[in-house]
Image (spheres, rainbow, N blue to C red):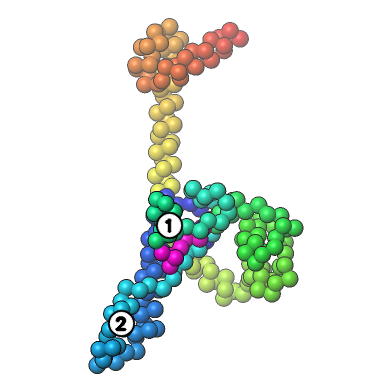
Amino acid sequence: MQKARPDYFVDRMFLQQSAFLIQSKYEWNQDNFGDMPSNLTDEERAKREIHRYEIPPTYTIWICDFPVPRQKSYRGDWAVRNEKGLTLSDKVKYILYDLTRFNKLYEEIKTAEDRWLYLLKHAGTAESLPDFKDDIIAKAINRLRVDKASDKLLKEQAKDMVMTEEELDYLAMLKVRARAEGEAHGLEKGRVEMALDMLADNEPIEKIVKYSHLSMEKVLELRDSQAMFTAK
């Protein structure tokens, strides 16, 4: 589940799916060949060799509370395809849910998928949530209620919320961006003030554009605004 959209979201999705695929392959190998003795027969070795590069189906599910790029519905099933739309393999699939596009009303909820998406969509805003007469969903709603959480669970969750290196990097990026935006705003403000002073001195428009580094359209807009203010 992803609340905020990170930079290079699709790249991150590929990286994590690759990690899941490698883990799945390792576990699949252990289940099928992990207990083989060291003195294998030719048949056993041949079987292992045949399946050396076989991978198990690995699907990653992403539930996003932000618009998913290039996706026009709340669910998208993505795979590796060629230019004609032919799927290279059914074993690798990315299932992306865009909660911002899931707008079904309670009366429109029909499937188990709809019920879970409705719960996730409204969990943080609704005063009460329907359990759809589903015991599993009822238990999930109960777990969401903080007032029923044990002290042990709350302490464990608080411990998990300690900033990781990735989270610290993300916060640092936000700070750097905020500073850059502030500096850009200050620079723009200084240019506007210079242009207004030059307009007050009746300097030529071309000269104001040259020295203020503002666009011609911006300088003309400032001139017209100044003229309107002076007329009043």
Per the image, is 185 magenta?
no
For label 2, the crowd category at 10 Å Cα-Cα, with few meaning under 14, some 14 to 19 and many 20 or more, is some
Compared with 226, 56 (above or below) is below
Is residue 94 part of the magenta span, yes or no? Answer: yes
Identify the residue at horizontal 47%, vertical 61% (top origin).
94
Above or below, 218 relative to 118? above
Q: Nearer the viewer, residue 86 or 16?
A: 86
Numbered badge on residue 40: none
Mark 1 lies on residue: 86
Q: Which one is in front in this view, the residue at disc 1 or the one at disc 2?
A: 1
Which span is picked out in magenta?
A: 89-96
**Residue 142 in view, yes or no:** no
Within the image, what quadrant is residue 186 found in? top left
Looking at the image, which residue is at 58% across and 54% down? 74
Task: Give x and y (percent) for residue 50.
Answer: 31, 78
First reached walking from the N terminus: tag 1 or tag 2: 2
User: Pointer 2: what residue?
Assistant: 48
Q: What element does badge 2 sit on?
A: helix
Label 1 crowd bin: few (<14), some (14–19), many (20+), radius 10 Å: few
Helix, strand or loop status at disc 1: loop
Residue 29 in the image: above or below residue 215: below
Residue at 41% x, 43% y is 177
